[in-house]
Structures are given as C-alpha cells and as structure tokens.
Image (tube, helix red, strand yellow):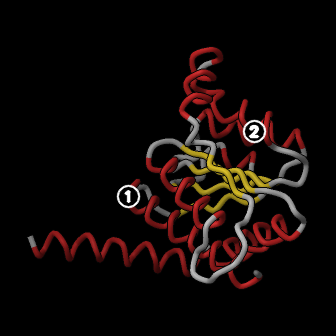
Amino acid sequence: MRQLVEIELESHRDIIDKVIVSMVPAIAEACTLVTDTITRGNKILLFGNGGSAGDAQHISAEFTGRFVKERRGLPAIALTTDTSALTAIGNDYGFETIFERQVEALAKEGDLLIGISTSGNSANVIKALQIGKILGCNTLGMSGRDGGQMNDVCQINLVVPSQITARIQEIHILIGHVLCTAVDSNY
C-alpha cells in the first residue's frame, strides 16, 4: 500500500513540475482576466460536467463567499447547481444546451465564462463558450490532454499537460485557487 501511495504522489509531483515549466505565463494572464472582470463590475459564470462541475461550484463559492481574506462577496455563478434549469433545459432542448441556454439568459457583454473540461471537447461546454463569444463575453478554459476544441473557442485555454483525468482535475482546482489568490490580492 505504501508503494501505491508513493507512486500516486510522485505522479502528482511530476505534473506540478510540468505545470510550473509550461503554464505560469498563461495562468498569470488568466489571473489578470479574472481580476479585470471583477474590477469592471462584471460577473464570472463557471460550468463543467462531473468533477468539473464540482470544481465550478468550488471556485464560484470561493468568489462569492471568501477565499482566505475577508472581503466583500464577488459576482460568480456556477451554472451547474440549478437542478430545475438543468433538467428543464436538458429535457426540452438536449443535454448539450444546458450551459448554453443559461449563458444566453444570464451573461452580458464583458462577463467572463470559465468552462472546465478535462478533454476540452465537452459539447455542452463548447456550446456555452461559443454563445458567450457572440454575446461579447470573455472566455477562459481549463482543459487537459491537447486542449481539444476549447483551443478554438477560448481566449485563454489552460491546458494541463497530462492524459490522466485525476491529474488534470487536481491541477484545475489548484489553478482555481491561484485565481482566487489573485482576486484576494486585489480586494
């Protein structure tokens, strides 16, 4: 059992080393995008499926509640939490539109959409990012592998250099916490 634990932790450390080498400039750019959005008085809409939905909710809660320091609540909404909207939209229009319809209803020009997908190819995430661009929103992606279709629909796509879903998800929440640290440093 000890060997299994050591192998898992070593795998985690390896991906952290890759992230430090390859992703720091893009993460810093994402931090600026997030803080500028809030400074302008716009909001952040976050979405993803499965574990990525959990990450969207986690990051949103850090903005609306607090991360580390006491500050006012900041405008962020996880589009993964309203079961009535999710099931009604999914039933009436199809699962691939559950985030797109909410973005269409809630987003305004200058808002920031943060789409999270380990593959970068989740159809409902892609559709939401596409409609957001049409509405004049900024688009930030968190993906993995090769970045998938999110490379084409995001201003910044933070592509975790891994094929392993668990490692990608671990880095996504780490990046989310870095974004929260940037926000805390400005408020």
**Viewer-nearest residue: 72 or 177:** 72
Disc 2 target residue: 103
Residue at 60% across, 19% down = 94
- Mark 2 packing: few (<14 Cα in 10 Å), some, or many (20+)? many
Quadrant housing the C terminus: bottom right
Disc nearer the start of the sequence (2/1): 2
Image x and y of residue 151, in percent: 69, 50
Marks 2 and 1, Cα distance to the nearest angstrom?
A: 28 Å
Disc 1 residue type (three-letter): Ala
At numbered mark 1, what does the secondary structure look like: helix, strand or loop?
helix
**Viewer-nearest residue: 38 or 121:** 38
Residue at 78% across, 72% down = 35
Above or below residue 150? Residue 39 is below
**Viewer-nearest residue: 165 or 99:** 99
Above or below residue 43? Residue 31 is below
Above or below residue 25? Residue 52 is above
Disc marking residue 166: 1
At numbered mark 2, what does the secondary structure look like: helix, strand or loop?
helix
Image x and y of residue 91, in percent: 57, 16
Q: Left or right: where does residue 45 sit relative to residue 87?
A: right
